[in-house]
Amino acid sequence: MNLSSSTPEKIIDCAGRLLDLSYPRIMGVLNVTPDSFSDGGDFIAPEKAIARAREMVEEGAAIIDVGGESTRPGAPPVSLEDELQRVIPVIEALHAAVSVPISIDTRKPEVMQAAVAAGAGLINDVNALQEPGAVEMAASLEVPVCLMHMQGIPETMQDTPTYNDVVDEVTAFLQARADVCMQHGISKERILLDPGFGFGKTTTHNLLLLQQLQRLVESGFPVLVGLSRKSLIGKVLELPVDKRLYPGVALAVLAVWKGAALVRCHDVQATREAIEMCQAVRDVR
Ligand code: 8Y7
């Protein structure tokens, strides 16, 4: 059930597949790193990844985010060759297997190009297209982009995150990156912003960003959030990663209440039901 939404219709064209953001939607996480879908060895079994993606679409995911580079705190960098070998076969198979848009989680322009050629329709860059050539590549590929804020680099970002005003700084950074994208010909309608929960932020920084998420929403760009299973839940509740479902759903609801348009998560069914219920209350007239 989609009760009438107070927001105007917002439909984003992801290389021919539509993402309707006129009500809050789910981005399902599909990690294709060897620890997630390998068959014991060091390579990915695409069939397993496809089965998981199909399941997420049945549970109501509006877009599937494919990533082959771990950006968890302390994670080592992945070579271009390894990243391509992980994600491209999966995107090709996924493009045929599901009808929802596919997003590519990468920082590398070469991966963006190959992924879009293989069927991806949105670029999700935790580095906000700051890699040399990334903005130009994204503009030439003519797909929407999600710009995420990160302080530092994954290897060291959680060592000493420092801000004067985290909400101001994150919002100003994302607005500046959006301006750069628009100067390069990426239209406003194709830009999403993400505060980057957990990326160079203390627990207090993360909580403040969610408490004041409306300040980013007021920028006018659709806001994406990723809070699912993240360590801020572990810090507040002292729970291991496999016990973070209920608080993760609560955080998704709070983000949607504050105006988030897209929620990136692992637990699709539970999160989708919760945010649709939240939207029904938020938008009833
Ligand atoms: C996010 C993300 C990750 C996020 C966006 C994890 C790739 C860490 N987190 N992309 N990626 N936003 N846009 O725990 O919060 O999933 S990886």
Image (cartoon, rainbow, N blue to C red):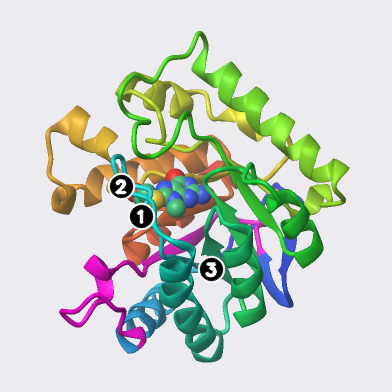
* Image quarter of residue 17: bottom right
Provide residue 161's location: percent of width, then percent of height: 38, 20
User: Mark 1 highlights which residue?
Assistant: 70
- Secondary structure under badge 1? loop
Q: Could you tell which of marks 1 and 3 lies nearer the N-terminus?
A: 3
How far is mark 1 from mark 3, CA to CA?
20 Å
- Secondary structure under badge 3? strand
Q: Is residue 129 above or below residue 47?
A: above
User: Mark 3 highlights which residue?
Assistant: 63
Is 60 within the magenta?
Answer: no
What residue is drawn where x is 32% and y is 46%? Answer: 72
Q: Is residue 3 above or below residue 281?
A: below
Q: Which residues are magenta?
A: 20-46
What residue is drawn where x is 30% and y is 24%? Answer: 159
User: Mark 2 highlights which residue?
Assistant: 75
- Check disc 2 and give the amino acid type: Ala
How far is mark 1 from mark 2, CA to CA?
6 Å
How far is mark 2 from mark 3, CA to CA?
25 Å
- Check disc 1 and give the amino acid type: Ser
Foreground mark, 2 or 3?
Answer: 2
Image-based side of 151 in relation to 174, left or right? left
What residue is drawn where x is 40% and y is 29%? Answer: 200
Mark 1 sits near ligand 1, with its Cβ under 8 Å away: yes
Q: Could you tell which of marks 2 and 3 lies nearer the N-terminus?
A: 3
Q: Residues within 10 Å of mark 2 (few under 14, many from 20)?
A: few
* Image quarter of residue 113: bottom right
